Image (cartoon, rainbow, N blue to C red):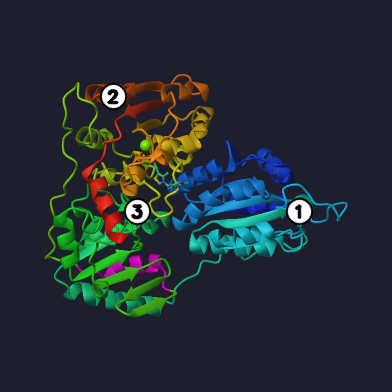
Amino acid sequence: MKQTVIQYVLSRLNEIGISDIFGVPGDYAFPINRAICEDKRFHWIGSCNELNASYAADGYSRIKGLVGLCTTQGVGELSAINGVAGAYSEHLPIFHLIGMQPSTPRQSNVYMHHTLGIKEHDIFLKMSAVVYCAQAILTPDNCVLEMERIINEALYHWRPVYIGIPEDYATLLIKENESTTKNIKKHSDPSAVNAVVKAIVDIVQKAKTVCIFPGILISRLGLCDTALAIIEGSGLVFASTPMDKGVLDETHPSYIGMYFGHYGDPKVYSFVESCDCILNIGVMMTEINTGRLTSQLDSSKIIDIMHHHVRIGSSIFQGIEMEMVLQELVKHLPRHTAMKSLPVSDLGNPKGNQDDPIKVEYLYPRWAQFFRPGDIVIVDIGTSFLPLIYARLPSRATFHNSSLWASIGWATPAAFGAALADSKRRTILITGEGAHQMSVQEISQFPRHRLRPIIFVLNNGGYLIERIIGGSKIDTCNDVASWHYQQIPKAFGCSDWLTAKVTTCGELDQIMKSIEKCETGAYIEIVTGKEFVSSMSKLIRSSFNRLR
Ligand SMILES: Cc1ncc(C[n+]2csc(CCOP(=O)(O)OP(=O)(O)O)c2C)c(N)n1
Ligand SMILES: [Mg+2]
């Protein structure tokens, strides 16, 4: 029996493994909303607004991969763009369904709501084109072919896709036959892969010192075990970079620490930069990953194994899939006997007396001690991000940040999405109060889905990182409204949560011990002064001065 457009879309999304769709309803999207709610294979995850929905989908996708997002035309989709852009930069495949105005309004000379008062119906598609790896507007005539194209693009690029469905088309029967050619996975030419792998093996064999950089794509593409097999088989060591922290287990004996250009640990950067070869598996050389451009890596010594290409020196081999290269490297990379791991520095023990106001030297080591195996740690961009990259994670714990797109407010909804994706793990959100104020209402989703996050709100009197890098004495623009944070969970329906406001090292220590035992969500405001500046933040200030 023929399906309607929306039934077909949902069937295909279900077949590729999507079950959860975040969003906010809207009249043009009603047929989509209704179909999702009526279909037992799906869960509609309502959000407070579309931006939060896109951030939550981002957090979910980091843990589970494919995810849905649904908004209405214009007002909804444009609110989501910021979050979708972040998902694009972080390689997160969000399938965004947009309910569009009917293809033929009954009176075609009227301007419909959620438009700019112009007749260009695909204007919003054009506005957001660059943050999706593919876009389509579905009709009963093109739905089958277009869905296959969109799915293939999303799976190939592992990035968001845009699926617009005019309201009246959603419930019309599809006119094509259902697709028989599904998910055409692009394979590399095996002989090209073999040649590239042979070249890599030759270089690694000749090199005295080699370091592996594992990037986020390894975890996005489900290749962590393969990457670990390479490390364990070859005996090579690996370092993390900030955006990619926690991709591989930081308790692994081959882990040598965090590489953050020359702002990082001198032991790590001296070793990494002196290596004869860096095997870079998908790390993007962003401003943050290069230690605010302080790194002195010799690109001729780096082999880049990227998503769809490999670069060796000045030669780029296109159409070579990371997955295939890694699978071959497991088989062919010989054991490298000369490699010795470095002792990994961590944040040490918290320093401070019980009655002392909370200090940098206390908070960050205490957080590091608080992390447990398997935790999902989500950190917003603010002063706490950089000190925390040096917290050595327990095994199977993962660390999520958005240091490339860096949109503050991302972490609160992203923590909700991540917690929903895997409720068996502890989800720990660490956010500045400035970032939190942007998306705070999304904490109301946790109790709605019986989730018990641990939330730390660092209240340091405003946008501290901006004060630090701005360097101006008069910076009232970096003040934020003072809120009674402790009262927020209750107002948002998190009635039974453990809440506290802590100002001393002793109070912080006590509350962390209580959280270990508590069976509800926890929401802790950590109050510090505006002088709560880590040595890392001071370095960052100097880097801004240097690059100005
Ligand atoms: C959406 C967005 N708006 C503005 C900024 C600029 N910005 C970067 S960090 C920051 C302040 C963060 O303050 P807070 O969350 O309180 O963390 P703190 O640095 O104080 O620890 C701002 C405004 C941004 N990155 N993203
Ligand atoms: Mg702040």
Which sits in the foreground, 301 or 77? Answer: 77
| Closer mark to the observer between disc 3 and disc 2 | 2
Residue at the image point whose x is 27% and y is 33% from the top: 370
Secondary structure beneath label 2: loop
Q: Is residue 314 left or right of residue 351?
A: right
Residue 259 marker: none
Q: Main secondary structure of the magenta part?
A: helix
Answer with mark 3 or mark 1, whichever residue precedes in sequence.
1
Answer with mark 2 or mark 1, whichever residue precedes in sequence.
1
Residue at the image point whose x is 86% and y is 55% from the top: 109
Q: Is residue 323 magenta?
A: yes
Residue 156 at what x, y percent from top left? 50, 64
Q: Amino acid at mark 1?
A: Gly
Q: Is mark 3 within 8 Å of ligand 1?
A: no
Which sits in the foreground, 4 or 538? Answer: 538
Q: Is residue 483 left or right of residue 150?
A: left
Q: Residues within 10 Å of mark 2 (few under 14, many from 20)?
A: some
Q: Which residues are magenta?
A: 320-334
Secondary structure beneath label 3: helix
| Closer mark to the observer between disc 3 and disc 1 | 1
Q: Amino acid at mark 2?
A: Thr
Residue 154 at what x, y percent from top left? 54, 60
List the residue tagged with mark 3. Answer: 243
List the residue tagged with mark 2. Answer: 503
Residue 117 marker: 1
Q: Residues within 10 Å of mark 1 (few under 14, many from 20)?
A: few
